[in-house]
Image (cartoon, helix red, strand yellow):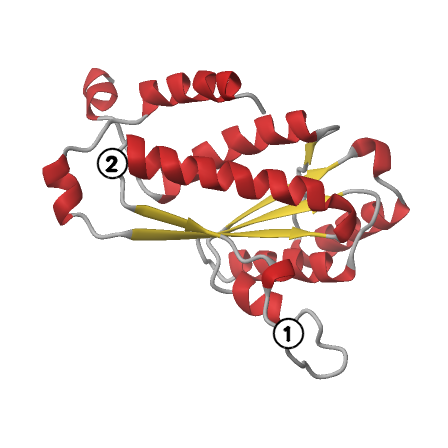
Amino acid sequence: MHRSTFCCYDLALAVVFFRRSEVERKYAPMRQVEVFISNGSDTNTYRNTAADVLKRLQQLLQAELNYDVAITNWDYRLASPTLVPAGELAGPSLRVVDRSHACIAIFGRSCPRITRAEVREMLIRQRRGEAVELFVFVDPKKKGRAHDQFFQDLTDAFGIELLWAPYSDPLSFQAILFTTLIGFLLNHLEIRNPALLGAA
């Protein structure tokens, strides 16, 4: 993605965010936002894109808008080797899901078992009343019966209709993820622009 495109996003954000003074930043506690990225190996390119978006948002908030925010995400590809009980391969990632504030689930041609388990775990947390978010992305051209069955199973189990976001290439995925995460961060961090609120 060219930097010029992100400049457009930065300009749009400037209307919404207000820049914190150094005094406000000095006494404000560091906030941590853990975003879990769930996907199968066939969509690792999109996982990399998601991680890059999170990195750019962190720099924007910290270096340019003076918010002490640490946006983190766990990458299973960098995890230390370990042993887990038979049949519990999803155990390590589910423990991270349980402490995450949001989950980005990316479905390509496959509908991975571990990704399905991670999505279910986030919905279980929502049903318990926890303030967590689930964002699902699907390539419509690659969606098959396994995806349809999984989404129907979620409807039956949780009484919800999963509204997923379509993507077709890295550029379209990046754009919708960027705007999705801006909305999430505004709400989660309770960031408000006093000038805009005063005009309301």
The mark closer to the camera, 1 or 2, is 1
Q: Tag 2's secondary structure?
A: loop
From what the image shows, is residue 196 above or below residue 150? above
Q: Quadrant of the C terminus?
A: top left
Question: At which x and y percent is residue 85?
Answer: 70, 84
Q: Amino acid at mark 2?
A: Asn
**Along the viewing direction, whichever of 151 and 90 lies nearer the viewer:** 90
In the image, taking residue 97 as reference, residue 72 lies left or right, namely left
Question: At which x and y percent is residue 159?
Answer: 66, 52
| Residue position for label 2 | 66
Q: CA distance from mark 1 to mark 2?
A: 37 Å
Q: Residues within 10 Å of mark 1 (few under 14, many from 20)?
A: few
Give whichever of discs 1 and 2 has the lower sequence position.
2
Counting the numbered discs, the total is 2
| Residue position for label 1 | 81
Q: Amino acid at mark 1?
A: Pro
Residue in the picture at 23% in, 28% down: 19
Question: At which x and y percent is residue 30?
Answer: 26, 52
Q: Quadrant of the N terminus?
A: top right
From what the image shows, is residue 49 above or below residue 100? above
**Along the viewing direction, whichever of 15 and 61 lies nearer the viewer:** 61
**Along the viewing direction, whichever of 135 and 29 lies nearer the viewer:** 29
Q: Tag 1's secondary structure?
A: loop
In the image, taking residue 133 as reference, residue 69 lies left or right, namely left
